[in-house]
């Protein structure tokens, strides 16, 4: 492929989702769009699909069937998800980036619909709708429900940021959004190396929205999001390494709270609100998901990352809210 003719790069990180990856890649292969490429990073993925194929074999099958060019990268050691997303963008050649999670899938013509809308309005960020799906006995069950908030229409300048950060009308999820690669690169340049694999869309979308000149939301459903699988579901936390991954989110809010850009007080207040909301969630997960024998060490780790005063402050807030 002549990379000068590449219009859209579909970027997919894969980590032990081989059983669902074929469905995801089939939805990419079904897109009727010229100028498409797939950029996929195998992030130490060790699983196999129902046919016993590993990630590499699944991707090679896709490549032969679809004729869509593939950039395939393998990580031989742990790389945080945020850094994997950075690498996906750097490896891409398209004018636009479309992030897709490997356990989700695209609607037919999703790429064409998003591209037409992006070109019509010249938007930096073009957002469409998603619907959630679940797996029951191996069968896909699509719901009419949405997982994230969504806003149709155009936004310009600082309204792109405020619609998400202050008004909470839009979401920070990167999927179902067609984003100019130039904007993505500028965003990643503003984010230092971060050892984060949870909530990584939050800092990325913060800078995308901060630098974006325009946003365009369309009502088309282009994306199907899996809700009952993945690393963020309500599974018991049985080891401190898994809990550490949760605690590292502190660095995300440190980055946002210390950002020296021209944010308004209302915007900074919204970041603090998001931070407290995440800490509240962390304390609840500590009490409900971390196994009892690890809770003292897990709380100590939470204090190491977030500061004891802050943890105790939010604990007191929670205590007052439950007794009032």
Image (cartoon, rainbow, N blue to C red):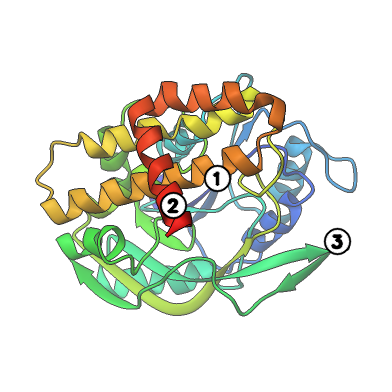
Are discs 1 and 3 less than 8 Å apart at CB? no
Q: Compared to 150, does 297 lie above or below?
A: above
Q: Residue at x 45, y 46 (%)?
A: 280
Q: Is residue 322 visible?
A: yes
Badge 2 crowding class, 10 Å Cα cut-off, few under 14, some 14 to 19, many 20 or more, is: some
Q: Quadrant of residue 135?
A: bottom right
The residue that label 3 is drawn on is 138
Of helix, strand and loop, which one carries label 1? helix
Separation (CA) of disc 1 from disc 3: 31 Å
Percent position (x, y) of residue 168? 33, 65
Badge 1 crowding class, 10 Å Cα cut-off, few under 14, some 14 to 19, many 20 or more, is: some
Looking at the rendered image, the quarter that the C terminus falls into is bottom left
Q: Nearer the viewer, mark 2 or mark 3?
A: 3
Of helix, strand and loop, which one carries label 2? loop
Percent position (x, y) of residue 180? 33, 54
Q: Residue at x 56, y 73 (%)?
A: 109
Is 255 placed left or right of 244 in the picture?
A: left
Are discs 2 and 1 less than 8 Å apart at CB? no
Of helix, strand and loop, which one carries label 3? loop
Residue closer to the observer: 79 or 11: 79
- Residue 6 circle label: 2
Q: Compared to 258, does 239 lie above or below?
A: above
Separation (CA) of disc 2 from disc 1: 46 Å
């Amino acid at each position: 492929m002549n990379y000068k003719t590449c219009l859209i790069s579909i970027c997919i990180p894969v980590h032990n989702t081989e059983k669902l990856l074929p469905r995801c890649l089939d939805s990419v292969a079904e897109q009727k769009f010229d100028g498409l490429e797939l950029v996929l990073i195998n992030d130490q993925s060790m699983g196999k699909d129902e046919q016993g194929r590993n990630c590499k074999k699944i991707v090679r099958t896709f490549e032969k069937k679809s004729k869509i060019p593939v950039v395939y990268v393998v990580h031989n050691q742990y790389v945080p998800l945020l850094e994997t997303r950075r690498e996906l963008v750097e490896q891409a050649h398209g004018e636009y980036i479309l992030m897709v999670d490997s356990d989700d899938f695209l609607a037919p013509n999703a790429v064409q619909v998003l591209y037409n809308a992006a070109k019509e309005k010249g938007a930096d960020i073009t957002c469409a709708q998603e619907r959630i799906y679940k797996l029951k006995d191996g069968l896909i069950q699509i719901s009419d429900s949405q997982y994230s908030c969504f806003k149709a229409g155009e936004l310009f300048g600082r309204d792109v940021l405020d619609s998400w950060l202050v008004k909470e009308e839009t979401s920070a999820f990167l999927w179902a959004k067609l984003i100019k690669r130039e904007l993505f690169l500028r965003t990643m340049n503003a984010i230092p190396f971060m050892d984060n694999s949870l909530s990584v869309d939050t800092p990325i979308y913060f800078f995308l929205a901060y630098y974006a000149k325009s946003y365009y939301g369309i009502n088309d459903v282009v994306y199907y999001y899996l809700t009952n699988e993945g690393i963020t579901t309500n599974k018991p936390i049985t080891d401190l390494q898994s809990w550490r991954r949760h605690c590292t989110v502190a660095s995300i809010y440190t980055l946002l709270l210390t950002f020296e850009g021209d944010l308004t007080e209302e915007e900074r207040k919204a970041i603090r609100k998001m931070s407290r909301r995440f800490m509240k969630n962390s304390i609840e997960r500590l009490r409900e998901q971390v196994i009892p024998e690890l809770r003292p060490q897990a709380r100590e780790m939470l204090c190491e990352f977030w500061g004891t005063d802050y943890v105790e402050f939010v604990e007191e807030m929670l205590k007052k809210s439950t007794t009032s």
